[in-house]
Each structure stands twice: as structure tokens, then as C-alpha cells.
Image: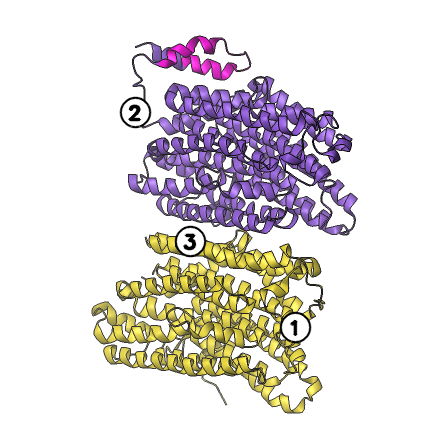
Chain colours: A yellow, B purple
Amino acid sequence: MQIPADQLANLHRLAPEVVLCVFGILIMVVDPFMGAARQRVLAYLGLIGTLGALAAVKLVADDPGLAYSGLINSDTFSIFVHVVVIGAAALAILGSVNYLDDEGLQRGEYYALVLFATAGMGILAGANELVTAFVGLEMSSIATYILAGFRRRALASNEASLKYFILGSFATAFFLYGIAMVYGATGTTRVDSIAAFFQSTPPAGLAILGLALMFVGLGFKVVAAPFQIYGPDVYQGAPTPVTALLASAPKVAAFAVMIRIFYVAFGTAGDVWFWAIWISAVLTMCIGNFAALVQTNAKRMLAYSSIAHAGYILVAFAAGTDLGVAAILFYLAAYALMKVGAFLVLTHLGQTGEKRLEIKDYAGLGSKQPILAACFTLFLLSLLGLPATGGFLGKFFAFQAALDSRVVWLVVIAAINSVVGAYYYLRVIVAMYFWEPDKDYIPTAVAPALTVALTICAIGTLYLGILPARVLSLAKAAADSLSVR
Amino acid sequence: MQPHLLTVITFLPLLGVPALLLLRSEDHTWIRRIALAVSLAEFVISLFLVRGFVTANPHYQFEEIHNWIGSAIRYHMGVDGISLFLVILTTFLVPISILASWNDIHEKVKGFFIALLVIETAMIGVFVSLDLFLFFFFWELTLIPMYFLIGIWGHDRRIYAAVKFILYTMLGSILMLVAILWLYNVTGSFDFPEIQAKLHAGIVSLPSRTEMLLFCAFFLAFAIKVPLFPLHTWLPDAHTEAPTAGSVILAGVMLKLGTYGILRFCLPLFPDAAHRAAPVIAVLAIIGIVYGALVATIQTDLKRLVAYTSVSHLGFVVLGIFAFSAISIQGAVYQMLGHGISTGALFLGVGMLYDRRHTFEIKQFGGLATPMPVLMSFFLFACLSSLALPLLNGFVGEFLILIGVFQEHHAWASWAASGAVLSAIYLLWAYQRVALGEITVEKNRTLPDASPRERVILGSMAVVILFMGIASPLFTRRMEPSTNLLLEQVNSGRPQDVKLPAKSPVTKLAPVIETLPSTLPPANASLVKIEARRVQP
């Protein structure tokens, strides 16, 4: 049978998702044939799947363009987001292997779900059409709902899963309702067609309402205030490596689709959504940072910190220019590395049953496990935004983009917020280095797979902090491919 | 080596870090030796800067420019007369600090020396950076090692002090970052000389309100670091709780990062705003001088006393800068160096007392000159240098500042001079309570005098104190072209402020100036020139 050339091109541009799904299905198929002792093999199969998908991204990069009659746009922007999302998933898998062993949860479906979720996020990143975006959103969401509840016997995990599921369903429903309204107003659901439509008639009434509803759905996904309520509970309850994934990849993908909708489709309505983003950014930063101040649980503290970071990204979002897009993309890359790194450190430190997650449990870690503590310190300092780390440059470019669009007060609020943030990140460092070591704590060696993941995160964080030029130019190219304003 | 000398000097200490990491943690002897060797090599290499420095050239020398992040953010380094000796001060004080912590650091020795070396790199980086991004990079980098130095190896309330120190400084610097970004968006560059040129030539002009806001954002960061009253409250805690080496670095170099920043960035970038803000800042500086001195007088804790002298002495520096007189600015730069050495020496002396008695309470001392004549005479020497006794380093800076300020605003000078008197009171009174009289605490009778290591430390500090006191022209000659250029940049475009009252009190000063010790020819000469111009009408 001859496959038509255009069909081949379509498949070609969806290659990463295809690879991810194939490996996901493969894991499910092989799973029954693997005894309990050999479930680990599936983990590596999952890892190969993500690496294969990364290789497939290269394939897409050679020949970018529209696919499936414009439903998918595999432009440079989509490629950049793909790399970040799939990379985060690969790191999360590396961090999960030993965790699941320790918890007695080593099951093939875990990795299959991670791959399906990642495929959904990939579709989100490339979605050039709102219903396609919705499909991607649902695909990633449903997989992550299950993952959040993967520690079946832990109440917190069950609570996280249920909460995430119920609230998430509402959010996606809002999103879908928004799509319907936009369709009603413009007669199309394709991003570029909507943009073309608004060229002649500025968005009004129904379309704006649709945008607002879509913002509710996406705001939920990126954990922006006032839709952040579920965040800390879900992040805290979910198994820690899943939290690492949840805090990074879905956020990245959701921001990507948000950029397409707000910047491209509704690019002419910048004045309309600017204040919504502005207010949401301020709320997100303040709620995230001030709530994190009073946390005693490190995992929950990091959950609030990721809310705060969504706020910083929204600061760049408020810029509304391609400079803003580049800043967001760079920020997302740096953020994914440091956040996954930080949560993976907690994966190890939590020990079996996730029982050592209080900040006070890490007293004297600096002298007991100097390398792990140094790693954790690096991620915390990066989250804090100190120079020589990716987190600093992320903030730097975000502030620069916002200032370039004269969004001055938002930047000042963000700057002050990041000093507030310094306090709680430093508290962990204080515990690790300045407190007397806990005598009862016997450190365990970090598993090889986790070591690899942490090393990649640490080197990546430093690389983005010291030699950001390359990634920045990629982010700029990605932003240019969107043709914002 | 010449074209990359600054890179070598900046990053050499960092090279010591992997060397230290390779050593076993228990191998304290070699950790100390390697750290000392690296820092001594660093000091020697940094002296090449002085050798290669062209005295008459007011511009940046040893410049290095490479693209770093895109073409906007560049690796741009250079020194001029203002930063030259601050670099040398840093490279001098670090080996001294390492030597001073030879025996009093027992835990996590490796980490301690790594922190010292990293902080050296960061501080030198701040002094030589000519790109605002690079500057900010190093500026923030100084915080982390100092945070650990205070937090891990400090005294009882170290955690409180460390967190207070870092949060205070960050609050200031983050707003400076916003201002830097703003400047970039206006001028399209992070390169300091380029921005300055653009602003100067009027290619880019800042509305006066914007200029004021930007000035404030920069100034706040520096004023916290200096620290200027009322932003000084972190200082007594940080200085008191830090280990000796930390206090020496903090007082000796890190406070100068603030005054250096004001001189280097605040004044040339925002001259109008600086002139407008000068009266307010000068008043704060004077309050700082007097308040710092008064508070120091009543301290019962010797280290805290020394810490408060910094508030007072740095007030002089800020006052000297904002008097906008060639002499006072030169004095300010000199005072920065002088204060680094003399306060460093005081902290070293206090640290040695602490090693012996494990207390800073003045009450616990008394009559120490009897068991420890050598140590106490060095301590007296440091006190005298700090209270600006002629022929010692403190005098030159303070005197130049007072003269310069007096020319411009004699009221400011008279208030500030009271601080000079007070400094004699608190230092000599403290010395009297610690060293003179009968031995009040029996334990003190058997205290050992300075060991050979301590004699080396204190002796080299004393030599520098004396050298800077009598050979000041060697320093001022190299500073003067740069400070004059700076002043020219700050004053150009502004109406020259020559409307002094007809019976200018400055004229009365003329005979005094002519009888100045011959140690001050450059300043003297320029002063007389100004004098001549003023007396004419």
C-alpha cells in the first residue's frame, strides 16, 4: 500500500507524539509478560520512549510546518516546548524508578501514563486549533489525574487525585465552553483564522467572554491565582516524582497554548487581556510567596513556590511582545530544570513513605550528604534567582521584556516578591547548613538513575545561568516563528 | 599576561576551589596552606596592576571586552584610579584573613576556605566590572559565601545575623536590577562606559523624575551596603556575629562595594539627581557619623563597638562623595582604603582577644597591656590609625574629606568634624578599659602574648597603616586623574557652583593649606588652584 506523501508529512510532523504513544502502548502490552521482579525493565522502556521522542523532535525540526489541515503547527515554537516537556518527562522517569521500588508501586502503567501525558502536552504545544488543544489538554490531564493518585494506600495521594480530577474537570469544561463561544463569535476554531478574523473586526462581547473562560481553564493548568487553590494540596499529596512532573511539564505546555491563544489569536485584543494578566500575576506572586513563607513542609513550600513562579512568568506574559515570548520560553526551560531538580531531591530525601519532608528533617544535611545538599542548594538559589543560575536569567529576561513594554509597576512588585521568596528558600539552606545535624537520620545513597537526573538538572541550571546565549537564541527563534504583532 | 591580567586576577582564587575540593576534609593543614598559597599568589599578581598602571591616564586600563550573552551583555572589565587600589586592598586582606583564621576554624575547614576564595573572586569582580550585568552578577555573588561565612562559622546569633544580612542586601539590589534593565531599555546597552557616553552626549535623555527614580534604585542598593543611616541596622549584627575573617572581609572590603558603587555608577550616570539628592544624603551621612560614634561610645561589647565605628567612618566617605569637591572625593577614595585597613586591623585584634578569652565583653578585659604588651601595642596602633592620627592612614582620608567638604559647605564639615573628635573618645576610652590600668579579671594575668603568626598579621597591617600614612602621594597620584575626571563628568552640564559668600571662610583656610604636611602634594596643588580661581573676584 502506498501512503500518500502528504499523509507521511502529517505523521512526520507529529512524530514525537507518535513515538510516545507507541512506547506507551508497548509498555501496556509488555506489562503482563513481565513478572513483578522485572517491572523495572518497563521503566527503561519508558525512558527510551522519551529519548526516542526527543530524537523525533529533531526529525520535526528538519521540516517544520502545518499538519493535518492546519490542526497542528509544528513550528519552532512548538519544537522548543516539545524539548522542554519531553525532557522534563524523561527526568521524572529517571527520578521515579527507585522511588516506585521503595514504595512497592513499580508498575508498567505508571510509565505508560507518563508517556501518554507527555504526548498530550506535545499536542498542546503544537495545537493550532482550539479543539485539538482541548484534546491535548484532556489527554495530559486524565493521565496526570491518575498519576497523582498513584500511591493508592496513602490518603493524601487519594485526596490529591480526586481534588485534581474534580477541579480539573471543571477547568477543562470552562475551557471547552470558551472555545464554543469563540467559535460562535468568529466561526472558526483555528488560531490563525481567528487572528485573521480579528484583523478586520476587533474582538468584542462573545469572543472576549470566550477568552475569559479559556483563561479560567488555562489559569488552572498553570496554577495561576485565583485558580491556584488546588495546587498545594495536589502537589503535596501526589507521589514526589509525579509532583516533579506536574510542576513542570503541564505548566510549560499550558503556557505554550496560552501564548498561542492570547498572543496569536487574540493578539489584537492585547489591551483587553492585559489587565486580567496583570491582576492575575500580582495575585499569583503574592499568594505563592506569602503562603510559602509560613510552610514547614518542604514539599508544600515548593508547591507554593511554583505558584509564585507562575506569577513571574505571567509578568513576562504581560509584556505582550515577541520579547515576552522569548523570555517566557527561556524561563520555562530554566524553571523546568530547577523545579524538577528540587522535587527530585525531595524524592530521595523523603525516604520510603515520604515521611521526611519537613524542613527541620534536613538539619545538618550539609555535613551528612554534602553533594546532595549542594545540589539542593543550587536549585533553591536558582529558584530564588541568584546570578550564575538559570533562575536568575529567567527572571532577568522576564523583567526586561516587561520593562520593554513599560509594565513598570508589575516588575517592581515582582522584584519585591522575589526578595520575599528569598526568605523561605534560605530557610531550607539555613536548616541544611546552619543547624546541628539530626543524630537519628541515617543518609541513604542516592540511586544511580536519580543521580543522573540530578546531575542533568544541576548542570543545566548552571549552563543556563552562565552561558545562556544559545538557549536564548533558540527561544528568540521560537518566538519569531509565532509572528506576534 | 598583560591583556588578560584582570581576568587572571578575578578568577585565580576560584581556581583554588577545585584544588581544595581534591583534598581530604580532615587534611586541615594542607587546606590552609593551599588557600594561603593561592591568595598570596593572587596578591603578588595583583601588584602587577600597580606596576602596569599608567598614572596620568584617567580612563580605564587593562580593559577586556568580549561578547557574552548576545552582543548586549558583554564581559567588560577595566580598572581606573578609583578601583585600582580597592582591588589591591581585597587581595591584601584575603591572605590576612586566611592567616587570621588559621587556628580558630576547626569545623568544616574546607568549606570555610572555599567560601573565602569565592568571595575574593566576587569582590574583585565587582570592582573591575564595567558592564552593568557583569557587575550585578558579581555583586550578588558576594552574598552567598558571606551568608555561609556568617551562618556556619559565626557566633551565637549567627543565623539571625546571616539572614538579616542577606535579605537587607537583596532588597536593595533587586531594585537596582530593575533600574539596570530600565537603563538597558532606554539606551540599548549594558555597557557602562557606553551608557554613560550616551547619557552624557544627550543621545538619550532621562526625564528628571525618571532619573531621580533610577538614582534612588541604584543608591538604595549601595546605601544599604555602605551602610548609610538609617539602613545600617544589619551591620552591627553581621559584623559582630561573623567569624574574625568574615568581619575583616565585611568591614574591610564589602562595605566599600557600596561606596564604590555610588562613586562609579550613581554619580556619573545620574549627575543631576545626585546633585539634587546631595543635601538629604549629606545630612544622613552626618547623622551616621555622629550617631555611629555616639552608639559606639556606649557599647559594652568590643566587637560591636568596632562595628559601629564603621557606620561613622563610612559616613565620612559618603559625605566626601556628595560634597562634589575634587579633594573630598579623593579623600573618600582614600578613606575607603584606610578604613579597610584600620578597621580590618581592629577586628583582627579583637579576634585575637576572643581566641584567648572567648568573649567580647569589655568588662572581661582590663590591664591587658601587662600580660600582652606586643598585642596591645599593635591594637593601640590600629586604634590610632582608626581615629585618624596624623602620619597614619586614617588621617589622610579624613583630612582630605573634611577640607573638601569645608570648601563647599562649611556647616557640613563642622558637624562631621565632631565625629572625628568622638572617634578619639570612643577608641581611646575603649583602649583604656581594655589595656590599661590594673588587671581586673584574674584569668587575664596569664594570657599569652602575640604568637609569631599573629605578629606577622598585625605587623603587616601596621606596616601598611604607616606606609599609607606617610607615602600617600604614591596612592593619590594614581587616583587623582580618575577622580578629577569623575568630578568633571558629574559637574559638566551643570552651572558651576561658584556663588560662595563674599567673605568666604575658605580664604581663612589658605594659610593652613600651605602648611599642610608635604605628604599631600597632589591634593594640595589642586586645592590651591581652586583657591586661586575663587579668590580672584
- Using the image, tell me which numbered label, if any, was put on residue A341: none
Q: Are marks 1 and 3 on the same chain?
A: yes
- In-front residue for pair B20/B93: B93
* Residue beneath the point at 42% across and 38% down: B194
Residue interval drawn in magenta: B505-529
The total of numbered circles placed on residues is: 3
Quadrant containing the C terminus of chain B is top left
Can residue A414 be found in the magenta stretch? no
Q: CA distance from mark 3 to mark 2?
A: 37 Å
Eye-nearest disc, 2 or 1: 1
Q: Is residue A50 left or right of residue B326?
A: right
Q: CA distance from mark 2 to mark 1?
A: 70 Å
Q: CA distance from mark 1 to mark 3?
A: 35 Å
Q: On the image, which quarter does residue A373 sit in?
A: bottom right
Amino acid at circle 1: Gln
Q: Chain of mark 3?
A: A
Q: Is residue A143 above or below residue A200?
A: below
Residue B391 percent coordinates (x, y):
59, 17
* Residue beneath the point at 44% across and 64% down: A288
Q: Secondary structure at mark 3?
A: helix
Q: Which residue is mark 2?
A: B495
Eye-nearest disc, 1 or 3: 1
- Using the image, tell me which numbered label, if any, was put on residue A415: 3
Q: Which residue is mark 1?
A: A351
Q: Secondary structure at mark 2?
A: loop
Q: Chain of mark 2?
A: B
Mark 1 surroundings: few (<14), some (14-19) or many (≥20) residues within 10 A: some
